C-alpha cells in the first residue's frame, strides 16, 4: 500500500514538472544572431522617405542615375519602362545616333531660343540637323509671372521648316497652378498662329538654381496638375504634348502615373541615357557646335523606332 502511494506521488510530480516545462517560453534561436537586412534596403530616397525592404521590391526601387547616383524611386506600374540599349548608341564629333538591327532609329537635333541669335537654317540643315525644338515663350520668375514671347520664335519656326528641318516647340513655364499652365498653352498657340508644328510642344518647368523664383514652393501634386492642364490644352489644338525635365524632377517631383500618356523629353548629360522610364527625346549636351549658329547649342536625339523610346508607338 505504501509503495503504491509513493508511486502515485512520483507520477504526480513528473506530471507537474512536465506541465511547468511546457509553460516556459522557448528562446528564439535567432535572438542572438538576428537575420541581417541588406544595407541597400535601408537607403533613403532624395524625397526623404525611408525605403523598406518591401518597398524596395515593390513601390520603391533603386536606380543608378548618371547625375544623382544610386537613388530610390517610386516605380509607377502604368508608366512604360525604357528599353534603350547602350550598345545601340554611336556618335561622331557632333551628334549621337541610335540604331536598331543596323537601321537608324533616331533623328538628330537641337533646341534653340533667341539666345542663339539669328540662325542660318540652311547651314544648320547642311550640318546634319534633322529637327529643332524652338522656344515659343516663357514666364518671368517674379511674383507677377508675366508671360513673354521669344523674339525669334516665329522666324525660327518658319526658317527651320523652310530648310526641311522638322520643328517642335517648348514653353519655359513658371506656372504655380493648373489655371496658369493652361493659360501658357493658350499663349503659345497665339504665338504659333497658323504655324503647324511637326513635332511635340513641350512643357518646360524646372527648379531654378541659385535664384529665387515664383515656383520655388510648388509641390509635386501641383506641378503634376500644371503639366496635365498644359498637355491637355495643347492636345486640344491637335498638337502632341510633351514634358521636358531633368531626371531629378521626373523622379522626385512629378507623379508620372498621371502623365503616362505624355511623351517625355529628358535632360541628362551623359554618354548614354540612364533614365528608368521611356523617353521620346533626350537632351544630352549643352555645348554643341553647329554651323549656322553662333556659339554653343543644346543637342538632342529623337527616338523614331517604336518601342525604343518613341512617342510614335
Image (cartoon, rainbow, N blue to C red):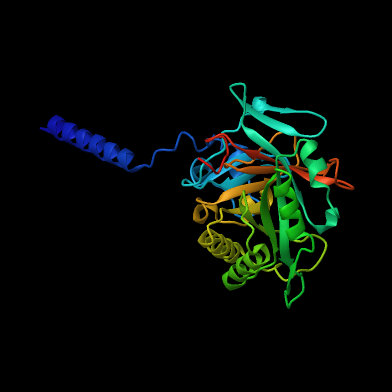
In this rendered view, identify the residue nearer to me: 112 or 40.
112
- Of residues 280 and 269, the one nearer the viewer is 280
From the viewer's perspective, tell me whether residue 175 is left or right of residue 2: right
Image x and y of residue 195, in percent:
64, 58
Q: Residue furthest left?
A: 1
Residue 284 visible in the displayed image: yes
The furthest residue to the bottom: 144
Q: Is residue 110 left or right of residue 43?
A: right
Q: Residue furthest right?
A: 295
In the image, taking residue 218 as reference, residue 11 lies left or right, namely left
Residue shown at the point (59%, 47%) measured from the top left: 73
In this picture, is 18 found above or below 184? above
| Front one among 181 and 272 | 181
Residue 21 occupies quadrant: top left
Instruction: State the residue at coordinates (74%, 59%).
Output: 153
Query: Is 11 placed left or right of 91 in the picture?
Result: left
Q: Is residue 87 above or below residue 106?
A: above
Q: Residue at x 46, y 47 (%)?
A: 78
Amino acid at each position: 500500500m505504501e509503495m503504491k502511494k509513493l508511486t502515485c506521488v512520483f507520477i504526480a510530480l513528473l506530471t507537474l514538472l512536465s506541465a511547468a516545462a511546457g509553460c516556459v517560453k522557448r528562446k528564439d534561436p535567432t535572438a542572438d544572431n538576428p537575420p541581417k537586412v541588406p544595407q541597400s534596403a535601408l537607403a533613403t530616397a532624395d524625397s526623404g522617405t525611408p525605403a523598406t525592404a518591401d518597398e524596395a521590391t515593390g513601390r520603391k526601387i533603386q536606380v543608378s542615375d548618371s547625375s544623382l547616383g544610386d537613388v530610390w524611386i517610386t516605380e509607377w506600374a502604368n508608366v512604360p519602362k525604357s528599353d534603350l540599349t547602350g550598345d545601340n548608341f554611336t556618335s561622331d564629333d557632333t551628334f549621337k545616333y541610335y540604331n536598331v538591327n543596323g537601321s537608324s532609329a533616331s533623328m538628330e537635333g537641337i533646341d534653340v531660343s533667341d539666345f542663339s541669335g539669328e540662325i542660318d537654317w540652311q547651314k544648320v540643315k547642311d550640318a546634319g540637323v534633322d529637327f529643332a525644338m524652338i522656344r515659343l515663350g516663357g514666364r518671368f520668375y517674379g511674383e507677377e509671372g508675366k508671360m513673354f514671347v521669344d523674339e525669334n520664335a516665329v522666324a525660327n519656326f518658319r526658317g527651320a521648316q523652310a530648310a526641311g528641318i522638322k520643328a517642335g516647340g517648348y514653353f519655359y513655364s513658371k506656372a504655380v497652378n493648373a489655371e496658369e499652365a493652361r493659360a501658357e498653352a493658350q499663349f503659345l498657340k497665339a504665338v504659333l498662329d497658323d504655324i503647324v508644328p511637326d513635332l511635340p510642344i513641350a512643357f518646360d518647368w524646372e527648379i531654378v538654381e541659385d535664384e529665387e523664383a515664383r515656383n520655388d514652393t510648388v509641390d509635386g501634386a501641383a506641378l503634376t496638375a500644371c503639366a496635365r492642364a498644359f498637355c491637355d490644352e495643347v492636345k486640344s489644338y491637335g498638337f502632341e504634348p510633351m514634358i521636358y525635365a531633368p531626371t531629378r524632377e521626373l523622379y522626385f517631383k512629378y507623379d508620372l502615373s498621371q502623365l503616362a500618356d505624355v511623351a517625355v523629353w529628358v535632360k541628362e548629360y551623359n554618354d548614354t541615357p540612364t533614365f528608368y522610364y521611356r523617353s521620346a527625346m533626350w537632351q544630352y549636351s549643352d555645348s554643341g557646335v553647329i554651323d549656322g549658329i553662333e556659339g554653343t547649342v543644346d543637342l538632342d536625339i529623337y527616338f523614331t523606332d517604336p518601342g525604343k523610346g518613341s512617342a510614335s508607338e
